[in-house]
Amino acid sequence: FALCGFGLSRAASEIKKSWGEKRLSELRELKCPVFVVDGNYLVNRSGPRLVESCEALAETIHEELRGHFGFLGSEMLATLETALSWKEAGIETGSQKIRPPPFDVPSIATPPFNPPSMSPGEAVSAQLKCMQNDEIEKAFFWNSEANQQRWCAATRFEQVLRGHDDFRRLMSEDAPVVGSEELDNVATVKVRLPKTDNAHQVDFVWTLVVEASGDENNTSCWKTERVAVKPQ
């Protein structure tokens, strides 16, 4: 939803008023995320804000980009449920039209460590352990060189992890490796977040590639090329 002229809380209020509880309940039953965009600052404005609008929309469409441009969770983009909760709490959004600050991308000459040579499953477990220990920079360097370039920096990598419900759980819950396959220099590893009282079971598929580890012996190791959430 992007209601022209309205901030998130006002837009959520108008949606609730016009749709009613019955239709909102039907919408919730679809079990897909519904987002509200600030229709005053974004989407309905011409000029450079077209680019910002595209970034915000990209965050809603692509799970792996949520939080990537700094919009999700700000006063410019939130889930409908979040916007409704703001309205119920008396929080009015949209009074400050300030774009979320850009990321400072640090220049890191060398990685904080050289990943050791191990099996694909062990490499994924090591990356998960870094995430759970809040060693984000180390977790970032378990990614392949191409993947690091896509994320730009460990700070952005962390924000996207924390901005996605399923990936955020990986930072605090045990997620065992439940399967692994190798073919030449590419491997896939399946990781499972078990069902809990408050959350559903989630299966992830890691894709890893072989790259030089960077040590003096020029050994190779498995690094994460991408991670996908497997549909249930």
Image (tube, rainbow, N blue to C red):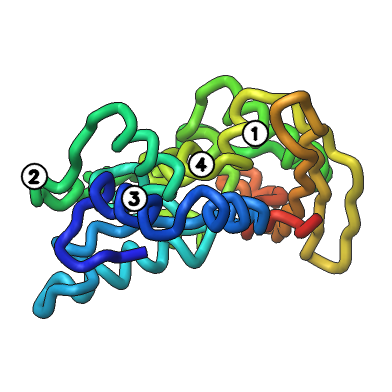
Q: Is residue 161 left or right of residue 103?
A: right
Say few, some or many: other residues with alpha carbon within 10 Å of mark 2 (under 14 / 14 to 19 / 20 or more).
Answer: few
- Who's the residue at 85% across and 68% down the image? 184
Q: CA distance from mark 3 to mark 1?
A: 30 Å
Looking at this rendering, what residue extends furthest in the bottom direction? 46
- Name the residue type under label 1: Leu
Q: Is residue 63 left or right of residue 4?
A: right
Query: In what element is the residue under mark 1?
Result: helix
User: Which mark is drawn over residue 161?
Assistant: 4
Query: In what element is the residue under mark 4?
Result: helix
User: Which residue bears the numbered disc 1?
Assistant: 170
User: Which residue bears the numbered disc 2?
Assistant: 96
User: Which residue bears the numbered disc 3?
Assistant: 12
Query: In what element is the residue under mark 2?
Result: loop
Nearer the camera: disc 3 or disc 1: 3
Q: Which quadrant does the C terminus fall into?
A: bottom right
- Name the residue type under label 2: Gln
Choose top left, top right, bottom left or bottom right for residue 90: top left
User: Which mark is drawn over residue 198?
Assistant: none
Q: CA distance from mark 1 to mark 4?
A: 9 Å
Q: CA distance from mark 2 to mark 1?
A: 34 Å
Q: In the image, residue 120 lies at what x, y percent? A: 80, 47
- Who's the residue at 59% across and 50% down the image? 25
* Pointer 2 or 1: first along the chain: 2
Q: Closer to the camera, 158 or 48? A: 48
- Name the residue type under label 3: Ala
* Pointer 3 or 1: first along the chain: 3
